[in-house]
Amino acid sequence: MNGLQNLATHTIAALQGLLSDLSSFWLIVQFIVLLATGTIGAISGAMVRKRVDITSLTMGWPPMLRVLTRTFLDSVGTIVFILLALIARTVMLSLTWPSQSYLVGVAVSLATAWVVIALVAGLIRNQFVHRVVAIAAWTFAALDILGLRSAVREALDSYAVVIGGLRLSALVVIKAAILLLIAMWVANTVSDFVERRLRSVTDLTPSVQVLIGKVARILFIALAIVIVLSSVGIDLSALAFFSGAIGVGLGFGLQKIVSNFISGIILLADKSIKPGDVITIGDQVGWVTNMGARYTSVDTRDGREILVPNEDFVTQQVINWSYSNNRMMLKSTFGVSYDSDPHHVRKVAVAAALRVPRVLHDPEPVCYFEEFGDSSLNFSLRYWIADPDNGIITVRAPVMLALWDAFKEEGIEIPYPVRDVRITRQAAPDTPQKRS
């Protein structure tokens, strides 16, 4: 309560000082100066923004420089206000006491803090983090300029609860929340930079790149949490109770999450599944696009992206078409009429498949005569491709069209199904005659 009373005392004293100066001539002059300089700054900023095409001006510039330029252009009006107010305050200081221009000085300090914070926070792309950082920094600067920072700090620190050996005050919670938010953003930004750099290293396999990136992200996040807790004065040894509770939670309620996380580490370490692989899990066929801490993203190339838990890749049977190499065998089935020569059909089918650019010549396509069908001789054409990540249907369709064209040229007929339908008429039973 002493901190709250101290804050109220400081606030009342500041208000009383302001009210006592309302009848002062210089207070009216300060209001006029602020109004005039603010109006000129707003008009100047609007004119500059109207005349400058920021998109064409910053074309080809680095992203960070474009953001800074756009933020600076948005703050031109405030910068003009700061310059004009500084000039006015210099003139007032030469004519009267410094206390007679205090209000102008406070306005200049607040506006300067606003511009600096806007330029720094503008580099943060996350809008939520950007707003939190801007509000927190400007609030701190405003309290410091007005001389209320110590009073507010004492007031927030006066409200606290003690849990075990840990004292949690409102000040500690606010500081920890803001610092943790900033630290997590920094950790994720650094992790994204490390992952981008790892993807450019061609000596590392995709699975090793993802593994190093995920481990680095975990280490950065853990380091950020430890630094924040230490900076706000929280003794990490006092968190033993919470760590025990987390352990119990992991043992009961978070089994699947931990299992998926460990499974993801195992998959990245043994390289059984890696980004770019063509896999079949269950009845789904797709390409591994991303491996996360909890799930793996599989693209089915039909507009769907399946998020498969990492545990399924460890506990279930998975077909990896590109585990040892990228070659993949495809199969196309067809039937021809009984008037066709099976030996000639096999040669024509193999030659037709070789006309398709994506079909490999080594190993060469193979055509098998499989069975005598009801109305056709049934064959299966098997061929290999080296780029399954470019799609399967995009090679199967050209192969089928090549078979159609080749059969048309060679006079090989693809029969229609023939069905014999016999209709028998059953004699109606004799009807009894009516008696007269």
Image (cartoon, rainbow, N blue to C red):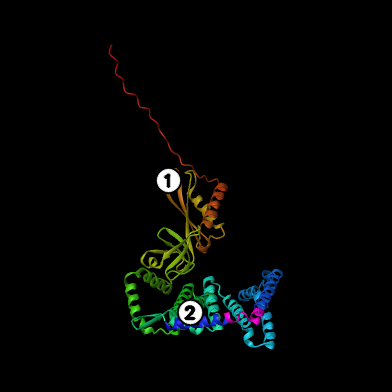
What span is in magenta? 19-30
Report which residue position mark 1 lands on: 373
The residue at the point 42 percent across, 49 percent down is 371
Near mark 2 (Cα within 10 A), the count class, few <14, some 14-19 or many ≥20, is many
Q: Secondary structure at mark 1?
A: loop
The residue at the point 53 percent across, 78 percent down is 139
Q: What amino acid type should be assigned to the residue bearing mark 2? A: Leu
Report which residue position mark 2 lands on: 179
Q: Percent from the top left, x then y, of residue 266?
A: 40, 73
Q: Residue furthest front?
A: 23
Does residue 201 appear anywhere in the picture? Answer: no
Near mark 1 (Cα within 10 A), the count class, few <14, some 14-19 or many ≥20, is few
Quarter of the image for the C terminus: give it: top left
Does residue 209 appear anywhere in the picture? Answer: yes
Q: Earlier in the sequence, mark 1 or mark 2?
A: 2
Q: Percent from the top left, x then y, of residue 19?
A: 57, 79
Q: For the stretch drawn in magenta, what is the main secondary structure?
A: helix
